[in-house]
Amino acid sequence: MRIFGLAGWSGSGKTTLLTNLLPEFAARGLRVSTLKHAHESFEIDQPGKDSYAHREAGAQEVVIASAHRFALIHELRGAPEPSLDELVARMSPADLVLVEGWKGHSHPKIEIYRPSLGKPLLHPGDPYVVALASDEPVTGLALPWLPLGDPQRIVHFILDTLGLPRWPS
């Protein structure tokens, strides 16, 4: 599966951009899956639910399923965090996997940057950053600049970078 990422500091707009890109990919008939990296512990299940009780009682994996969706919760229980490649290998086939986070992985990515945050640029230390998307142009940039407010242009850039057609036949 082809992988493309969005990387940037917290508050830069990665999630907002990703959710704006998904309808553009869907309009082109592409099946897109997403992977989001969380830096802290997180919960997708809630106390009082049966699946939560299963996990708390010691289940290694809990699958919650209905006629509309299913979710797999895997407890690491002290095991190392799986790599991006290991997680992608567990996913169903898709035309593209959009990754939010995983700054250190060797997949092509767009850096999401907001000068107003006062944070340094990431791309000088990451050779896999292929463009910078920002809410304002950045001077002296050696990479292509993409406006954050133009998801169609960003989708075209991603498709072109990955060698995928802009409109599948």
Image: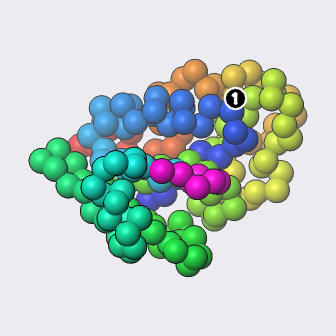
Quadrant of the rendering where the C terminus is positioned: top left
Picture coordinates of residue 104 (x, y %)?
A: 69, 61
Quadrant of the rendering where the N terminus is positioned: bottom left
Can residue 92 be seen? no
Which residue is found at the position 65% from the left and 46% from the top?
7
Q: Please give the residue where the numbered disc 1 appears in the rendered image.
A: 134
SS for dot 1? strand
Can residue 60 be seen? yes
**Hey, which residue is sitting farthest left in the picture?**
67
Which secondary structure dominates the residues rendered in magenta?
A: loop
How many residues crowd around disc 1 within 10 Å: few (fewer than 14), some, or many (20 or more)? many
For this view, does 49 lie left or right of residue 11?
left
Which amino acid lies under the numbered mark 1 shown in the image of this protein?
Ser
Check residue 38 for magenta coloring. yes
Q: Which residues are magenta?
A: 37-43
**Hey, which residue is sitting farthest bottom in the picture?**
79
For this view, does 47 lie left or right of residue 114?
left
Check residue 14 for magenta coloring. no
Picture coordinates of residue 158 (x, y %)?
A: 51, 44
Which residue is found at the position 30% from the left and 32% from the top?
27
Q: How many marks?
A: 1
Picture coordinates of residue 146 (x, y %)?
A: 64, 31
Picture coordinates of residue 46 (x, y %)?
A: 39, 47
Between 46 and 22, the one nearer to me in the picture: 46
